[in-house]
C-alpha cells in the first residue's frame, strides 16, 4: 500500500508491540494458493485455507498488520453503511436482509474462533445503536427498525421517552448483541499464529511486482527476483488493486479517526454500545478495553498522491468537538491519536468475493465498506470451500462483475 492511503498515528499499531517479525522471501517456492496482502483479510484467508488443509502462502509488501489494518476502527456490525430503504435503489430487499443475516453469521464465526483459541485480541461482543437527532428522520429510522424486527432480528426501537443515552436522540434502532469490537492488529497476528502451525507460510517485506498467468497456474515475481508458483492468486490488498485489475472496484473516500487517552468513566454511554449516527457521511463511536474512545467519520473525496494536512486538521477538530459535545458527562476527554485512511464503498455496500469473470486463476477477497472484516470472514469461509469445489449461493451477492450491466 502506498503512503497516501494512510496518514497519522493509528492507535492499534502505535499501542501494540510487534509480536513477531516474519521473514522476507529468499528463494523460489511453490504453493496451491497465493494470498497477496498480509493485513487482517490476508490473515483470515490464511486461517480458513489452512483449516481446510490447502497449501497457501501469504505475501505482504510492507509489515504484517499495518496500513489499512492499522487504520480500521474494527467496529463490527451486521448492518450495512446505508439504511435498508436507501439500498433498495441498488439491490433488492431480500438481498439486504440476507446480507444482514450473513453479517450475524460472520460475527458468530468470530465468536467460534475466540472460543476455540482464546481471546488474545481484546474481542468483545457488543450491542449497537443506529440513531438520528433529527425529527425529520424519525420515520426513516422506525422503518429500518420495523423491517429488521419483522425479519427476526433482535432489535428495539427507542425514542426520546426511552432513550438510555445522555445525548440527544429522536429515534434509534438498538440491536441486541448485533456487533463486536476487537484490536485488528492483535487479531491479525493471532490468526497467523494459528495458521503457521497448520502450514501456512508468511512473508513480509516481500512485494509482488508482476503476475503471470500460465496454463498450469500462476507465476508471481517478487522483489529481489524470487518467484512464487501457485494454482490461483487471491487479491487481499484492500484498495491497492491496480497490479491485478483495471476494474474500478468502488468509490474511495478518506475517513478520519481520533482516539482518546483512557477516560475515567463512560457516563451517559449506555452499555458502551457501538454507535453510528444517520448522517451522511455518518460518524461512528466505540470504546476500547483500556477505556479509550475512538470516533471516526467526516469522510471526504479521496485524492491519490495528495494529502491535505489543513483539511485533515479541520476534520480532526470537528470530530473532537462533536465527541465532547455528545458526551458532556465524560469530563476527561483528551485526544492522543489522530489518523486517516482510504475507505471504499459500493452501491450496495457489499465487498467483492470470488473469481475474476475473465480469469479463473484470479480471485478476490476485497472487504469494502464498513463491514469489511465481516465480509472477509465470509470470504475465507466461502472461498476455501470454493477451492474444494463447493459453491455457496451467497457468493452471488458479492460477485465481482455485478455492476457491469
Image (cartoon, grey):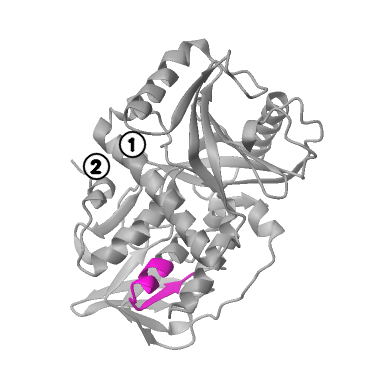
Is 204 situated above or below 243?
A: below
Q: Is residue 39 visible?
A: no
Residue 282 placement, left or right of 400: right
Residue 199 placement, left or right of 392: right
Q: Position of residue 270 (x, y in %)?
A: 64, 31
User: Which residue is label 1 attached to?
Assistant: 347
Label 1 CA crowd tier, 10 Å (few <14, some 14–19, many 20+): some
Secondary structure of residue under mark 1: loop
Sequence-wise first label, 2 or 1: 1
Q: Which of 5 and 155 is in front in this view?
A: 155
Magenta region, residue range: 46-60
Q: Position of residue 279 (x, y in %)?
A: 51, 25
Query: Which residue is painted at 29% across and 40% down in the image?
Result: 98
Query: Which residue is painted at 49% across and 48% down in the image?
Result: 304
Q: Position of residue 206 (x, y in %)?
A: 49, 75
Q: Which of 138 and 33 is in front in this view?
A: 138
Q: Are marks 2 and 1 in contact (CB under 8 Å)?
A: yes
Is 227 situated above or below 309?
A: below
Amino acid at each position: 500500500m502506498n503512503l497516501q492511503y494512510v496518514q497519522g498515528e493509528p492507535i492499534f499499531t502505535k499501542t501494540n508491540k510487534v509480536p513477531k517479525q516474519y521473514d522476507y522471501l529468499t528463494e523460489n517456492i511453490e504453493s496451491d494458493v497465493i494470498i497477496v496482502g498480509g493485513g487482517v483479510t490476508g490473515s483470515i484467508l490464511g486461517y480458513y485455507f489452512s483449516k481446510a488443509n490447502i497449501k497457501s502462502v501469504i505475501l505482504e509488501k510492507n509489515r504484517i498488520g499495518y496500513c489499512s489494518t492499522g487504520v480500521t476502527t474494527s467496529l463490527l456490525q451486521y448492518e450495512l453503511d446505508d439504511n435498508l430503504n436507501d439500498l433498495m435503489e441498488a439491490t433488492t430487499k431480500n438481498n439486504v436482509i440476507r446480507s444482514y443475516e450473513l453479517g450475524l453469521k460472520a460475527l458468530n464465526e468470530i465468536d467460534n474462533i475466540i472460543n476455540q483459541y482464546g481471546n488474545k485480541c481484546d474481542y468483545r461482543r457488543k450491542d449497537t445503536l443506529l440513531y438520528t437527532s433529527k425529527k425529520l428522520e424519525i420515520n426513516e429510522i422506525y422503518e429500518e427498525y420495523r423491517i429488521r424486527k419483522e425479519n427476526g432480528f433482535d432489535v428495539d426501537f427507542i425514542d426520546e421517552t426511552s432513550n438510555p443515552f445522555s445525548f440527544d436522540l429522536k429515534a434509534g434502532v438498538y440491536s441486541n448483541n448485533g456487533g463486536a469490537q476487537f484490536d485488528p492488529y492483535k487479531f491479525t497476528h493471532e490468526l497467523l499464529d494459528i495458521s503457521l502451525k497448520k502450514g501456512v507460510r508468511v512473508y513480509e517485506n516481500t512485494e509482488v511486482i508482476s503476475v503471470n498467468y500460465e496454463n498450469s497456474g500462476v507465476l508471481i515475481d517478487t522483489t529481489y527476483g524470487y518467484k512464487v508458483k501457485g494454482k490461483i492468486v487471491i487479491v487481499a490488498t484492500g484498495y491497492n488493486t491496480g497490479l491485478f485489475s483495471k476494474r474500478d472496484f468502488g468509490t474511495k473516500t478518506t475517513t478520519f479517526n481520533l482516539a482518546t487517552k483512557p477516560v475515567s468513566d463512560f457516563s451517559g454511554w449506555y452499555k458502551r454500545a457501538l454507535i453510528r449516527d444517520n448522517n451522511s457521511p455518518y460518524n461512528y463511536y466505540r470504546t476500547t478495553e483500556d477505556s479509550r474512545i475512538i470516533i471516526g467519520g467526516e469522510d471526504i473525496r479521496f485524492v491519490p498522491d495528495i494529502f491535505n494536512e489543513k483539511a485533515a486538521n479541520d476534520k480532526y477538530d470537528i470530530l473532537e468537538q462533536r465527541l465532547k459535545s455528545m458526551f458532556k458527562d465524560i469530563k476527561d476527554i483528551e485526544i492522543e491519536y489522530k489518523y486517516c485512511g482510504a475507505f471504499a464503498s459500493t452501491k450496495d455496500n457489499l465487498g467483492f468475493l470470488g473469481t475474476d469473470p475473465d480469469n479463473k486463476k484470479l480471485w478476490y477477497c476485497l472487504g469494502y465498506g464498513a463491514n469489511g472484516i465481516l465480509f472477509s470472514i465470509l470470504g475465507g469461509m466461502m472461498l476455501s470451500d470454493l477451492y474444494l469445489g463447493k459453491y455457496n449461493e451467497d457468493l452471488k451477492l458479492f460477485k465481482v462483475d455485478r455492476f457491469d450491466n
